[in-house]
Amino acid sequence: MAYLQPDKPGKVYLPAIRAAKENGEKLVCLTAYDYPTARIVDEAGVDMILVGDSIGNVIHGYGNTIPVSLDEITSACIAVKRGTERAMVIADMPFGTYHVNEDDSVRNALRLMKYGGAEAVKLEGGRNRVELVKRLVNEEIPVVAHIGLTPQSVYKMGGYRVQGRTAEQAKLLIEDAKMLEDAGAFAIVLELVPREVASMITNELTMSTIGIGAGLECDIQVLVLHDLIGMTFGRQPRFVRQYADMRRVMTDAIQNWSRDVKTGAYPNDDESYGLTDETLKELSGFSNPAAAER
């Protein structure tokens, strides 16, 4: 239909993700929370952008993801969507936005899609989320599930620890993953899960697995962008491989600029705006009467 705006060639939708799984093609996912970052990530060829509730940690400075609000995710999603042409945009459902009842959960998910521009939503939990996932999918909302370490359960779990280390725990994770796939989720995040367990889930499911601290076998790998580029403070998780030190780059740039300002090296004539000789001549005899009286 002529009135529909065409997508950029190669735009990533669900069929492309399913095809990648079938063909054994690895995909990549990164977080973004603003327009310029999303644009860079998208232009770099990343397949999926997650507007994650990790925004609470890396942008707002919260101690965990619990305080993140729906407004914060929606606002970030709007900016990310504007900067993205090819990648699929996935929005995290913050803590408390899908915990009360299904109707409210659907309304919140629809808000992220209708007003935020998200093309899918992600929520945490295993078998306890099966009925909700079914409802969301029935309402035409693509869903990414999330098991293993679920950061929104940090108080219940007592910290950020690897999940599924025992045979019993591993079986529960595998069962949860199968149930969520049957409920209609098109992908599932496996966070801080032993690589052997992640491999079993990946091989047994037709939906894509998204690994973070879950080994090499997952179909898709995701990282928080700030971890990847060194825009972080403190000790990093074992699974993070830092590919740049942007904190150092930014610090050097700011310090160099500050030095130039204080020594009179910035701005120079090429970085300033001047008057023509004719205008200067007209102003040469001008004096401010108020200044003259002083």
Image (spheres, helix red, strand yellow):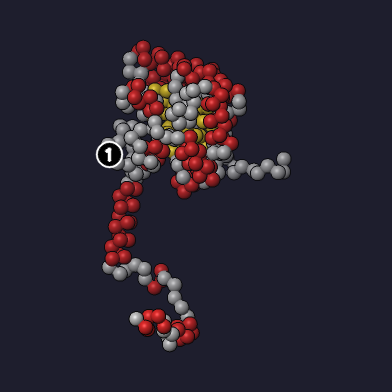
Q: Is residue 211 visible?
A: yes
- Residue 155 sits in quarter: top left
Which residue reaches farthest top? 168
Q: Residue at x 30, y 32 (%)?
A: 238
Q: Nearer the viewer, residue 206 or 257?
A: 257
Q: Nearer the viewer, residue 187 or 217?
A: 187
- Residue 229 sits in quarter: top left
Q: Is residue 206 visible?
A: no
- Give above or below for 41 relative to 137: below
Q: Residue at x 52, y 46 (%)?
A: 83
- Give above or below for 4 relative to 19: below
Q: Nearer the viewer, residue 25 or 242?
A: 242
Residue 143 horizontal/vertical position (percent): 53, 27
- Residue occupied by mark 1: 234
Q: Residue at x 33, y 52 (%)?
A: 250
Callout 1 secondary element: loop
Please state which amino acid type lies under the numbered disc 1.
Gly
Residue 118 horizontal/vertical position (percent): 54, 36
- Residue 199 sits in quarter: top left
Q: Where, quadrant-wise, is the C terminus in this rendering?
A: bottom left
Which residue reaches farthest bottom? 285
The number of numbered discs placed on residues in the rendered structure image is 1
Q: Where, quadrant-wise, is the N terminus in this rendering?
A: top right
Q: Nearer the viewer, residue 228 or 60?
A: 60
Q: Is residue 54 left or right of residue 178?
A: left
Question: Dot 1, how many residues are within 10 Å of its Cα: few (below 14), some (14-19), or many (20+)?
Answer: few
Residue 73 horizontal/vertical position (percent): 47, 37
Residue 152 horizontal/vertical position (percent): 40, 27
Q: Residue at x 48, y 28 (%)?
A: 97
Which residue reaches farthest right? 1
